[in-house]
C-alpha cells in the first residue's frame, strides 16, 4: 500500500496500458497497480466477447467478472485499441468500479497531439482529485516524477549492462523484476532493484561456455516468463526486451524543469511507439538500433493473438529483417503461453538456424 | 480491377436505361468515381468514405478513392471469390486473423491492381486495421499516410484536436492540387450536405411506414458507401429519387407484404447470399439499418471545420458502446421492429465487442436479436447453409 501525505494507506488504482502515467496515481495518494488478469481459464468473458479478441483484454475482463479485482478502488482504461475500448464499456456495465476513467491517447506525436494529451491528463488529474477529495499538488506530482525517474534510471542501468559481452542478468530475471515493479508497492521493490544493480558483471559466466546466442525480444504484452525460459534453457540469452513492460516502459525520464503535466504528456507520448501508434519506419529503425546496441544474433517478436496492429505490422518487420539478414521469428501466443511445447520446437529450430549460420 | 469496374458500370448503365432507380444511380456514381481514380491526370486521394467528413474533399478537384469499398466491390463482381485475392496477402504473411477487408486490400495492392494514390488519407475510426493498412500501402509507395485521429469523447479539447487536423489536411490538399481552399465553395458544399441530410431524414421517416416502402438491406450500404457523396449535389439527387420511389410504392400499394419488421446493423455480406430473399419470402422486411441513421447534427456553415470535426466525433461507431446501445434501442422503438439481425464479421472487434450490450438492451424491450456469425468478404468463413438454418429458426421464434 502507498502512504498518503497524512500517513494513511493509499488505495489501489489499476492501470492496463503503458501510456497511463503512474505518477498521477501516486500523487493522488493511491497505489498504481498494473492489471494482468492471468486467469487460469477464460469462461465468463467468452459470453461477452467473440473468440477472436485479444486474450489480454479477455483475461482482464474475466478477472473482473470473477470479482478478482475487488481490492481495486478504480481502473484507468485507455483508448489503446478496439479491444480496450470495448473492455471499458463491458466493465462499466457488467463489472463496475468505484473509480473508472477512460484516458484518450492521441495518435499524433506532435504539438497538437501533445496539447490534447496534456488536456487529457489534466482531466484525469481532476477526476482523481474529485474521487479522493484531495488536491494533487504540484509538489506531490514532482515527488512522484522524481521517484519514478529514479526507478527508470535504475532499471535502464540494468538493461544497459546487458549490452556487455557477458550480460549479468537472465532475461527472465529482468522480466520478473519488471512485473514485480509494476504490480507491487514501489517501496517493496526498491531493495530488489538495488540488489540486482550491485551484481557483478560476470555473474552468469561461472560455467565457461561458448558465447551464447543473444536474442532481442520485441512485441506487445508479455507477462509470462515462458518464452524467456525456453530461450534460456536452449542455451541462449535474452539480452533485452522491448515490450509493453520492457525497455519501452522504462526508457526516457520525465523532464523535471517544466510544468509537470506537460512534462508527463511529453514523456508518455513521445517515448518509442508501440504497435498501436503509427510510425512503421521509426519502429523498424528502433528494432535495427536495439539489435546493434545489444549486438544480438536474432530477434523474436512476441505478440498476443488477435492484436490487429501487431498482425499487420509483423510481416513488414519480418521483411525488413529478412532484407538485412537479421534472423527474425514471429511468435504468436495466447497470453498464458499455453502452447509451450510447440513454441519450444520453433524457438529451438530458430536458435539452431542462427548457430548454423555462424 | 479497372476492367471489373468498367463491366459493372456497363451493367448499371443498361439497368438504369431500362428502369432507373436511386440505388443504381448511387452505385453508378460510385463506380464511376472508382474508375476516375485510374485517370493519369487525376489527383487521387485515398480516403475512407464512411469514416471521413467527405465535404472537405469535395472542396477540391480531387478523386476520392476508398480502398476498402472499392476492393469489396470485387467479390461481388467475381461471384463471391474474394479469397483468391486475399491469398496474395496471406502468402506474404498477413494472417487470416486480420479482417478480410484488409486482407483483400493488401492482396489487391500486392497484385498491383489498385489505382495510384497521390495522397493517402486515413482515419482512426472505425477500427484499428484501417490506418495501419493505409500506412503499410503508403509506405510501400514511399509516401506518408496522413491520419485523421478522432478521439472517443466529445469536448472542446477533442473538437480543437480534430479541427487542427482537418486544417492540416486542407493544407495538404491545397499543396496537392495547387488550389487555395475557396471558403465560399466550401460553404456551398456544407449547404449541399445539409440539404441532403434533411432529405435523407425524409427517406428514413418514410421507412417507418407500414409496410416499409424500401429495402433496409440496401439502406445499410447506402448509409456506408453513400457517405462518399456528402457535400456533392449527387447525394440530394439520389435521395429525391429514393423519396419518389418510396412515395410511389406507398400510393400504388406496391410495397412488399410485411409480417415482421427487422432492424439491421452496419454490416451486410459482400458475397452472394440468400438471407434477404429468405426474409422477404417470409414477409420479414428489413426496415432500418443502424448505418442509415442520421447521427450527426446539421453542419454550421459559419464554421465548416468545426462542423466537420463534430460530425466525425459524432459518428455512431465512435464513442462509448453505451451511446450506441441507447441509439439502437431508440431505432428499434421508432421503427417498431419485431426483431433485430446482426451480421458479424469476426475481426470487427470494435463493432461486435458491444453486441452483448446491444442484445441485453433489446431483450429488455422484448426484441429478440439474431447474430449471424459469418464474414462479410471471405467466403471461406461463411456457410450459406448454417446461415440459412439460423435465419429460418429465428423466423420461427418471431412467429
Ligand atoms: S495487445 Fe493489441 S489488441 Fe491487445 S490490448 Fe494491446 S494493443 Fe490492444
Ligand atoms: S469490418 Fe470492422 S474491422 Fe473490418 S474493416 Fe470494417 S470496421 Fe474495420
Image: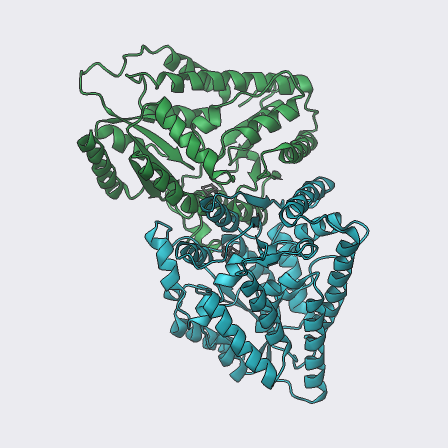
Of A327 and A325, which appears nearest the observer? Answer: A325
Does any portion of residue A325 appear in the rendered image? yes
Residue positioned most to the right: B302
The green-tinted chain is A
- Name the spot of residue A75 as percent of width and height, x first: 56, 37
Residue positioned most to the front: B41
- Residue drawn 78% across the image and 51% down it: B183
Find residue B9 and report its image quarter. Answer: bottom right
The cyan-tinted chain is B
Colouring mode (rainbow / by chain / secondary structure / one colour) = by chain
Of B152 and A61, which appears nearest the observer? Answer: B152
Residue A276 as seen in the image, left or right of residue B384: right
Which part of the image, by quadrant, shows the C terminus of chain B? Answer: bottom right
Residue B115 as seen in the image, left or right of residue A119: left
Residue A355 as seen in the image, left or right of residue B204: left
Of B87 and B341, which appears nearest the observer? Answer: B87
Residue B259 as seen in the image, left or right of residue B344: right
Find residue B331 and report its image quarter. Answer: bottom right
- Name the spot of residue B371 as percent of width and height, x first: 49, 65
- Name the spot of residue B338 as percent of width and height, x first: 60, 74
Above or below, comparing residue B77 to residue B231 in the picture: below
Q: How many numbered circles are shown?
A: 0
- Residue drawn 38% across the image and 33% down it: A218
- Residue drawn 68% across the image and 89% down it: B253
Above or below, comparing residue B260 to residue B80 in the picture: below
Of B182 and A334, which appears nearest the observer? Answer: B182
Does any portion of residue A12 appear in the rendered image? no
- Name the spot of residue B306 as percent of width and height, x first: 74, 47
Amino acid at each position: 500500500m502507498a502512504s498518503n501525505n497524512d500517513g494513511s494507506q493509499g488505495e489501489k488504482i489499476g492501470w492496463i496500458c503503458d501510456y497511463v502515467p503512474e505518477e498521477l496515481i501516486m500523487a493522488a495518494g493511491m497505489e498504481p497497480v498494473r492489471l494482468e488478469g492471468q486467469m487460469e481459464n477464460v469462461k465468463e468473458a467468452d459470453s461477452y466477447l467473440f473468440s477472436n479478441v485479444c486474450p489480454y483484454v479477455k483475461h482482464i475482463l474475466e478477472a473482473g467478472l470473477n470479482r478478482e479485482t475487488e481490492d481495486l478502488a478504480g481502473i484507468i482504461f485507455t483508448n489503446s485499441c478496439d479491444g480496450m475500448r470495448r473492455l471499458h464499456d463491458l466493465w462499466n456495465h457488467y463489472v463496475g468500479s468505484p473509480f473508472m476513467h477512460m484516458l484518450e491517447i492521441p495518435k499524433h506525436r506532435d504539438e497538437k497531439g501533445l496539447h490534447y494529451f496534456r488536456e487529457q491528463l489534466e482531466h484525469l488529474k481532476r477526476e482523481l482529485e474529485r474521487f479522493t477529495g484531495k488536491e494533487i499538488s504540484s509538489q506531490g506530482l514532482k515527488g512522484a516524477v522524481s521517484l519514478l525517474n529514479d526507478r527508470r534510471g535504475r532499471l535502464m542501468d540494468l538493461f544497459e549492462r546487458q549490452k556487455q559481452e557477458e550480460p549479468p542478468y537472465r532475461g527472465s530475471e529482468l522480466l520478473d523484476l519488471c512485473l514485480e515493479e509494476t504490480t507491487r508497492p514501489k517501496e517493496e521493490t526498491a531493495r530488489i532493484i538495488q540488489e540486482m544493480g550491485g551484481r557483478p558483471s560476470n555473474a552468469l559466466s561461472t560455467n565457461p561456455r561458448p558465447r551464447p546466442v543473444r536474442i532481442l525480444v520485441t512485441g506487445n504484452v508479455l507477462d509470462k516468463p515462458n518464452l524467456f525460459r525456453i530461450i534460456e534453457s536452449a542455451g541462449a540469452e535474452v539480452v533485452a526486451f522491448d515490450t509493453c513492460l520492457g525497455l519501452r516502459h522504462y526508457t526516457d525520464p520525465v523532464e523535471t524543469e517544466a510544468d509537470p503535466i506537460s512534462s508527463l504528456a511529453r514523456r508518455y507520448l513521445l517515448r518509442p511507439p508501440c504497435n498501436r501508434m503509427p510510425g512503421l519506419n521509426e519502429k523498424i529503425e528502433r528494432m535495427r538500433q536495439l539489435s546493434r546496441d545489444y549486438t544480438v544474433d536474432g530477434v523474436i517478436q512476441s505478440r498476443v493473438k488477435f492484436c490487429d496492429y501487431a498482425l499487420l505490422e509483423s510481416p513488414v518487420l519480418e521483411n525488413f529483417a529478412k532484407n538485412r539478414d537479421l534472423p527474425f521469428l514471429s511468435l504468436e501466443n495466447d497470453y498464458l503461453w499455453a502452447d509451450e511445447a510447440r513454441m519450444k520446437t520453433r524457438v529451438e529450430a530458430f536458435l539452431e538456424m542462427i548457430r548454423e549460420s555462424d | 480491377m479497372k476492367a471489373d469496374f468498367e463491366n459493372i458500370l456497363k451493367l448499371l448503365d443498361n439497368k438504369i436505361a431500362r428502369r432507373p432507380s436511386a440505388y443504381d444511380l448511387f452505385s453508378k456514381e460510385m463506380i464511376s468515381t472508382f474508375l476516375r481514380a485510374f485517370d493519369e491526370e487525376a489527383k487521387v486521394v485515398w480516403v475512407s468514405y464512411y469514416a471521413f467528413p467527405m465535404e472537405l474533399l469535395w472542396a477540391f478537384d480531387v478523386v476520392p478513392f476508398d480502398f476498402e469499398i472499392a476492393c469489396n466491390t470485387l467479390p461481388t463482381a467475381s461471384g463471391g471469390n474474394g479469397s483468391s485475392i486475399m491469398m496474395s496477402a496471406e502468402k506474404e504473411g498477413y494472417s487470416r486473423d486480420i479482417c478480410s477487408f484488409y486482407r483483400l486490400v493488401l492482396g489487391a495492392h500486392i497484385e498491383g491492381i489498385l489505382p495510384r494514390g497521390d495522397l493517402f488519407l486515413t482515419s482512426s475510426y472505425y477500427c484499428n486495421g484501417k490506418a495501419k493498412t493505409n500506412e503499410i500501402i503508403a509506405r510501400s509507395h514511399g509516401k506518408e499516410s496522413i491520419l485523421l485521429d478522432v478521439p472517443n469523447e466529445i469536448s472542446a479539447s477533442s473538437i480543437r484536436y480534430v479541427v487542427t487536423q482537418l486544417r492540416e489536411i486542407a493544407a495538404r490538399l491545397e499543396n496537392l492540387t495547387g488550389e487555395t481552399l475557396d471558403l465560399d465553395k466550401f460553404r456551398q458544399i456544407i449547404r449541399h450536405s445539409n440539404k441532403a441530410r434533411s432529405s435523407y431524414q425524409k427517406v428514413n421517416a418514410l421507412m417507418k411506414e407500414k409496410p416499409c416502402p424500401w429495402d433496409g438491406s440496401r439502406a445499410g450500404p447506402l448509409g456506408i458507401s453513400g457517405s462518399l457523396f456528402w457535400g456533392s449535389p449527387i447525394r440530394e439527387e439520389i435521395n429525391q429519387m429514393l423519396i419518389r420511389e418510396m412515395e410511389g410504392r406507398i400510393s400504388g400499394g406496391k410495397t412488399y407484404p410485411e409480417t415482421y419488421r427487422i432492424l439491421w446493423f452496419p454490416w451486410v455480406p459482400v458475397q452472394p447470399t440468400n438471407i434477404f430473399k429468405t426474409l422477404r419470402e417470409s414477409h420479414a422486411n428489413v426496415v432500418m439499418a443502424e448505418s442509415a441513421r442520421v447521427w450527426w447534427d446539421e453542419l454550421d456553415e459559419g464554421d465548416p471545420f468545426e462542423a466537420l470535426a463534430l460530425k466525425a466525433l459524432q459518428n455512431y461507431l465512435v464513442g462509448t458502446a453505451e451511446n450506441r446501445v441507447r441509439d439502437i434501442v431508440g431505432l428499434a422503438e421508432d421503427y417498431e421492429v419485431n426483431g433485430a439481425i446482426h451480421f458479424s464479421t469476426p475481426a470487427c472487434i470494435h463493432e461486435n465487442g458491444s453486441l452483448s450490450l446491444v442484445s441485453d438492451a433489446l431483450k429488455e424491450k422484448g426484441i429478440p436479436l439474431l447474430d449471424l456469425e459469418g464474414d462479410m468478404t471471405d467466403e471461406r468463413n461463411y456457410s450459406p447453409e448454417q446461415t440459412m438454418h439460423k435465419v429460418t429458426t429465428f423466423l420461427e421464434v418471431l412467429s
